[in-house]
Amino acid sequence: MNGRVHSQAFKLMIVHQLATGERRPAQICREHNLPSSLVSRWQKEYQMHGEAAFASKREAEPSAEAKIAELECFCGQLAMENALLKKALGKLPLSNGMPSLNML
């Protein structure tokens, strides 16, 4: 393995050239110094998943900021529900200093 990382745009360019017949696999392998197994794997991935096959893992996963925003929204929702429940609990009649469970 030579450790090269190819961009999504590059992979799409390669599979589009193959799909349209613009270039043959051997020609692409020679021009870009790519192993034929890699090019055929890209073709198979593209056939199975389309352009989503080449999306990076970072693009597929939500960012840390998005996760934080989602959790803050959820926390706010829980706080509102908690406040509503406390208010409703305060309106229940008391029995021995505790709200009656029959009323819940």
Image: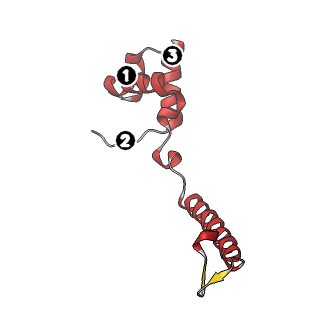
Q: Position of residue 1 (x, y in %)?
A: 27, 38
Residue at image coords 48%, 35%: 54
What numbered label is drawn on residue 40?
Answer: 1
Labels 3, 2: front one? 3
Q: Is residue 64 above or below residue 55?
A: below
Q: Which residue is mark 2?
A: 4
Looking at the rendered structure, the kind of residue marked 3 is: Ala
Q: Along the horizontal axis of the image, is 39 left or right of 73?
A: left
Instruction: Write down the quadrant of residue 95 in the picture.
Output: bottom right
Residue at image coords 50%, 39%: 55
Circle nearer the N terminus (3, 2): 2
Q: Which residue is mark 3?
A: 19
Residue at image coords 66%, 76%: 89
Label 2: which secondary element: loop
The answer to the question of whether label 3 and label 1 lie on touching residues, with beta carbons closer than 8 A, is no
Looking at the rendered structure, the kind of residue marked 1 is: Ser
Q: Position of residue 44 (x, y in %)?
A: 41, 22
Label 3: which secondary element: helix
Circle nearer the N terminus (3, 1): 3
Looking at the rendered structure, the kind of residue marked 2 is: Arg
Instruction: Write down the quadrant of residue 65 in the picture.
Output: bottom right
Say which of 28 and 54 sits in front: 54
Circle nearer the N terminus (1, 2): 2
Q: Along the horizontal axis of the image, is 88 left or right of 5?
A: right
Q: Is residue 62 above or below residue 81?
A: above
Say which of 69 and 29 sits in front: 69
